[in-house]
Image (cartoon, rainbow, N blue to C red):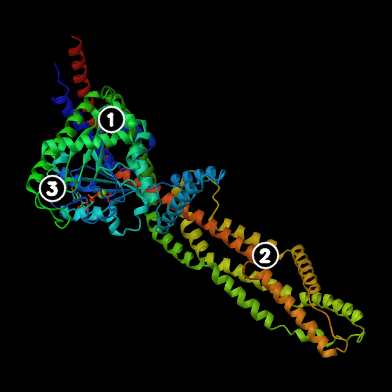
């Protein structure tokens, strides 16, 4: 009878899994279409073992011991802080790699949607809304950092690692994953994939261990990362308890139906960790049983639903002493020979359990017979992908050089633009111009010629003075205010021109023409250069500000404003008021009126100010859109080049896979026949 568990069949399956892993790391997740990813996921029985537990419960230390990392606590630090800030997916690889996966743009939209829906019942969800807004702001902020670097969220990035020695690989891993590294991008990274050459991992090469972020962490971004892990396919959960207290981070796991399934199938492990801190002589077998019994009681009290399946949970009791060699942080953990022997024994049992369950699950998987068909699909996908790429790349080969040389040009222009875009500069110039302009007006001139008929009759005088003021206002408008509009308009116009003319010039002459050939060499598309949309913006601004109707409206606006303002002025005059006094009263009120008008319309927050600002903003938005377009094109183009370059590797892996799948299928049929016989 053909043995599935031990003979060449499993070996073949393992080889296939290994090849698929390689394929995935060659292709890089960002290049996998959703379709491709689904195929890969379905046929690749990669086992995910999730190590979770409260912050600082010893998860990373446990993984270090598990992987026989010698005495250097490679996945952990010696600090008592939430160190692992990104889930790290650890698996075997002959050539080490570290890949950071960033949160996608979609998650920002998802969060926005969620906030909107909660805001319908704002009072009830105050806390949730605040939480989501915090996440939202963080993600948007990260997006800005990325955009400034010309990159986008949602892609994964290969970290260039120095592979001379292991120590440096781990140092670099910590730099991208540990909170103590101070890496400012940490919040934006949703997961890290880490592959390296490790003897234990080589033996269990279809297992991926996940060193998770601590549960019960107050930072919502970190819990978001944890949520993401929990939603993925997990085959074994190992929960680490540093003491006997059961927190909600554990009990809330039972909200997922998958947890109960894992327990029932014997794939839920609890490690009572930091044994050295739990009590004396716990390495004795009887004490161990006692400890587990005590813990089980507490567990039943907190999660009564697991009553029927509690015996399916695997228990291990461990401590940091299982690490090979001498302890590093002796001030924290005391050496103890018996505890060391005991812990290493426990750890070996844990290792055995992992290897066994890996075979158990492999045997149970029904997908194996489907391998062949799906692999063929996969192969075809790769084929078409690389064929299409090849023809595309060939076609654009001649443009590639232009494109590549344009990238630095684009970046230069981008930089100079960002400098000039500073609107504050524009408005402070306007402000200065307004002040200068107003201080040059000779207010006395307007009242010099005025003489009053009704001196002595205060009622009549009041009416007379009001009439003068209304007439003079009209004159002041024609003489000055209308000019001020012109000056400010010109300033904004110049600002728009100055800020973008360099860009428009370079973009149209250098970029646009070339890009048009590269992006759609064959399509006879109506190409709208950037300058067109930008100039459209400018014209719109110019039209609304300079048309004669607008001029009439502005005059009417001013007169209405002045009428209102002057009616509220204090025109009361003493009975024996002299002419100079009356003139100065008039000119002071006129002056105040005009100054206030300028303030309300042209300066910060004023009506006209806001309108001008809106135009400048619109221009910025147009600019952003165009930059985004470039970045997308850049990315698309880079990935095309990439697939083309790796085509041979992709092809050879796929071919070997199909060959293996065929052989495995024959073995499987033999096996099935032997069962039936
Ligand atoms: N006394 C004692 N300390 C331990 C033991 N295991 C780990 N520690 C210490 O506990 C601290 C946290 O250990 P980590 O392995 O970083 O814990 P973690 O669960 O990965 O922590 P986060 O990633 O921060 O959630 C470190 O200072 C370890 O040295 C143990 O068995 N006994
Ligand atoms: Mg950790």
In the drawing, what numbered circle is on residue 607?
2
**Few, some or many residues within 10 Å of mark 1 (<14, 14–19, 20+):** many
| Image depth: mark 2 or mark 3 in front | 3
**Quick one: 646 or 447, which is closer to the camera?**
447
Q: Give the residue pinned by disc 1.
A: 263
Give percent across and percent down for residue 488: 65, 71
- Asked where in the image residue 26 lies, by quadrant, the reply is top left
Distance between the Cα atoms at labels 2 and 1?
66 Å
Above/below status of 20 relative to 489: above
Residue at horizontal 75 percent and vertical 84 percent from the top: 443
Give percent across and percent down for residue 51: 25, 41
Above/below status of 479 relative to 551: below
Residue at horizontal 35 percent and vertical 56 percent from the top: 185
Above/below status of 240 relative to 559: above
| Image depth: mark 2 or mark 1 in front | 1
- Asked where in the image residue 425 lies, by quadrant, the reply is bottom right
Q: Give the residue pinned by disc 3.
A: 321
> Which mark sits nearer the N-terminus, 3 or 1?
1
């Amino acid at each position: 009878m053909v043995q599935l568990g031990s003979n060449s069949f499993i070996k073949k399956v393992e080889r296939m899994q290994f090849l698929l892993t390689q394929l995935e790391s060659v292709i890089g997740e960002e290049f996998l279409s959703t379709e491709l990813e689904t195929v890969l996921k379905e046929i690749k029985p990669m086992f995910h073992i999730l190590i979770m537990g409260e912050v600082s419960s010893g998860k990373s230390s446990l993984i270090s011991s598990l992987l026989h990392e010698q005495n250097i606590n490679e996945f952990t630090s010696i600090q008592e802080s939430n160190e692992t800030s990104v889930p790290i997916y650890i698996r075997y690889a002959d050539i080490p790699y570290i890949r950071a996966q960033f949160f996608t743009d979609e998650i920002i939209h998802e969060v926005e949607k969620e906030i909107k829906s909660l805001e319908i019942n704002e009072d009830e969800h105050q806390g949730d809304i605040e939480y989501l807004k915090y996440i939202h702001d963080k993600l948007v902020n990260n997006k800005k950092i990325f955009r400034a670097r010309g990159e986008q969220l949602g892609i994964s990035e290969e970290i260039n690692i120095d592979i001379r020695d292991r120590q440096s690989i781990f140092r670099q891993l910590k730099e991208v994953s540990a909170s103590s590294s101070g890496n400012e991008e940490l919040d934006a990274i949703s997961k890290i994939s880490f592959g390296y050459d490790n003897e234990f991992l080589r033996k269990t090469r279809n297992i991926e261990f996940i060193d998770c972020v601590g549960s019960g962490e107050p930072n919502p971004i970190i819990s978001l990362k944890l949520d993401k892990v929990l939603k993925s396919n997990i085959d074994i959960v190992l929960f680490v308890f540093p003491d006997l207290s059961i927190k909600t981070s554990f009990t809330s796991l039972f909200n997922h139906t998958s947890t109960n399934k894992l327990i029932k199938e014997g794939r839920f492990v609890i490690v009572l960790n930091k044994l050295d801190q739990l009590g004396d002589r716990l390495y004795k077998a009887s004490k161990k049983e006692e400890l587990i019994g005590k813990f089980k009681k507490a567990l039943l009290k907190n999660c009564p639903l697991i009553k029927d399946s509690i015996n399916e949970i695997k228990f291990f009791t461990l401590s940091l002493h299982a690490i090979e060699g001498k302890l590093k942080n002796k001030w924290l953990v005391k050496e103890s020979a018996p505890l060391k022997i005991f812990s290493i024994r426990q750890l070996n049992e844990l290792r055995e359990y992992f290897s066994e369950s890996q075979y158990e699950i492999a045997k149970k998987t029904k997908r194996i017979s489907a391998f062949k068909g799906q692999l063929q699909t996969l192969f075809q996908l790769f084929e078409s992908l690389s064929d299409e790429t090849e023809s595309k790349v060939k076609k654009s080969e001649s443009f590639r050089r232009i494109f590549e040389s344009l990238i630095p040009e684009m970046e230069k222009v981008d930089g100079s633009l960002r400098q000039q875009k500073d609107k504050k500069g524009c408005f402070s110039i306007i402000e200065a111009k307004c002040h200068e302009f107003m201080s040059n007006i000779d207010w006395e001139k307007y009242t010099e010629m005025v003489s009053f008929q009704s001196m002595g009759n205060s009622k009549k005088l009041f009416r007379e003075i009001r009439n003068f003021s209304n007439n003079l206002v009209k004159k002041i408008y024609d003489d000055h205010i209308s000019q001020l509009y012109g000056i400010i308009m010109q300033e904004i116009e110049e600002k728009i021109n100055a800020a973008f003319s360099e860009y428009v010039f370079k973009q149209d002459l250098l970029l646009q023409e070339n890009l048009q050939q590269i992006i759609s060499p064959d399509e006879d598309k109506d190409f709208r250069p950037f300058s067109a949309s930008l100039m459209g913006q400018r014209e719109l601004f110019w039209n609304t500000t300079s048309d004669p109707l607008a001029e009439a409206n502005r005059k009417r606006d001013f007169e209405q404003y002045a009428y209102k303002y002057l009616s509220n002025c204090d025109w009361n005059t003493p009975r024996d008021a002299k002419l100079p006094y009356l003139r100065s009263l008039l000119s002071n009120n006129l002056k105040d009126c005009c100054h206030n008008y300028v303030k309300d319309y042209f300066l910060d927050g004023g009506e006209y100010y806001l309108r001008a600002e809106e135009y400048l903003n619109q221009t910025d938005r147009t600019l952003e859109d165009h930059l985004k377009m470039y970045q997308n094109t850049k990315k698309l183009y880079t990935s095309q080049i990439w697939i083309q370059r790796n085509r041979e590797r992709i092809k050879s892996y796929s071919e070997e896979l199909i060959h293996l799948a065929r052989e495995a299928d024959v073995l499987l049929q033999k096996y099935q026949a032997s069962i039936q016989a």
